[in-house]
Amino acid sequence: MNTSPPREGSLEAPTRHPLNWQAPEFYDESVLFEELERVYHICHGCRRCVSLCDAFPTLFDLVDASATLEVDGVAKKDYWKVVDECYLCYQVKCPYVPPHEWNVDFPHLMLRAKAIQFNKGERKLSHRLISSTDLTGKISSIPVINQTVNAAKNSPVLRKMASKMLDVHPQAHLPDFHRDTLRKRLKNHQPRALQAIAAGPTRGRAALFATCYCNFNEPGIGEDLVAVFEHNGIPVRLTEKESCCGMPKLEQGDLETVDKLRRKNIPQLIGLIEEGWDIVAAVPSCVLMFKQELPLMFPDDADILKVKRHIFDPFEYLLHRHKAERLNTEFQNPLGTVAWHVPCHQRVQNIGPKTREVLSLIPGTEINAIERCSGHDGTYGVRNGTWAKSQKIARPVIARAQKVEADYLVSDCPMAATQIANGLDLKHTETNPMSLLRKAYGI
């Protein structure tokens, strides 16, 4: 175990090594446990991440309750308890990430452990089902089924059944499913006949990757994005078709399904890019999947690397336009005080606070950024065993929003926004920054 003092004076930027997930040794459990012990030892000695997801408090509690007060006193079977709590968020603030010689990539180590669990059949079937977001969305948008699913949310009897069958906590907030999906709403939408003008790395034409959540659960976010982009002279179209980005399956360790989804999505996106379209998606985890996780899984795939260069967070895209003086800044409505939660999956893209920078252009608007985990993390925020922990993690974020007496609470992650907003008494119901931008424009 290399625990020599860290190098001094390194100015190299944090980086990540490719995920060698197709190699047989990746699934060697004995090698995994050696690495888990090494990294757990480093994390125990540092404890900087104690305020993040519950993986770190779980680890530190195990160590503190052991006979030796060190990692060697923790039973190997309890190592999995840490794995089950990890959100797979890469933290560049960790002092030991590559290129540091200790080479700590905690989320990829946890992902490796989850992949081994999945291959051994130890991930719950219910978790596999609720992580199949495109399938559940398609089924739940069928008219008769749609009414039943949405009604079941408010039925104590049906919620109790769902708790037993699907491992969904009876008190967990569940989103509505829409029969009138984003794809149906924009079926006949034609990109405006606007001249595409390049600005920075953007080419001035955007194809919207709808995402499962925006398509089935909150189609209004996608409509707001289209309205804002076209108000700024950017023609917008939907991708011809799409499957789930793969993030929910990645979080389950189901890497083979991630690969299957990759083979469905990438050719679609490449075709659009070659026609001159940029790609945008309104959910940070989906952008992150194409910008970071897939390139790390397939570092030699030229098409994936091309998509990485041409996919953008929506506010990243708009700020590139602003820097080239191509953003419409004729705002009609001030927004007052906005509490903006910064999603983890947006922060790790290393693009900076683009949402805050764009919203700050609106006169009469004050942006208060909250850089702390919302605790939702997809299925973690609704499962029986983790719902209460998720709520606990969200409480400091809710307290921060209450302290600033915000008129609006928004997050680029719609699931995080709902998690936080449910604990607040807000003056306005909008919880997505793109919806606020549209409101400021008065369109």
Image: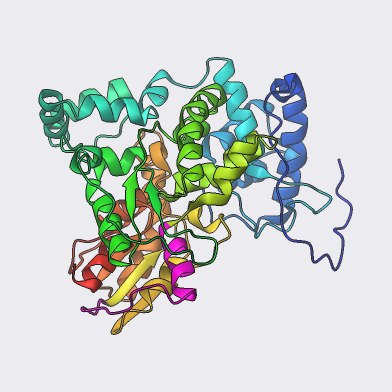
Number of residue marks:
0
Q: Is 84 left or right of 367, judged from the image as shown?
A: right
The outermost residue toward the bottom is 364
Which residue is rendered at x = 83% and y = 65% of the image? 10
Range of residues picked out in magenta: 314-335
Residue 331 shown in magenta: yes
Q: Is residue 399 magenta?
A: no
Which residue is at 38% across, 73% downward? Answer: 327
Q: Position of residue 341 (x, y in %)?
A: 40, 63
Q: Residue furthest right?
A: 4
Question: Which sits in the foreground, 370 or 316?
Answer: 316
Is residue 268 in sight in this rendering?
A: yes
Q: Position of residue 305 (x, y in %)?
A: 62, 43
Q: Position of residue 397 (x, y in %)?
A: 39, 62
Q: Nearer the viewer, residue 309 or 143?
A: 309
Question: Where residue 394 sits in the image (x, y, percent)?
Answer: 39, 55
Q: Nearer the viewer, residue 175 or 259?
A: 259
Horizontal arrangement in the rendering, residue 304 relative to residue 363 (left or right): right
Q: How does the figure colour the protein chain or chains?
A: rainbow
The quadrant holding residue 82 is top right
Note whether 347 is above or below 159 in the view shown. Answer: below
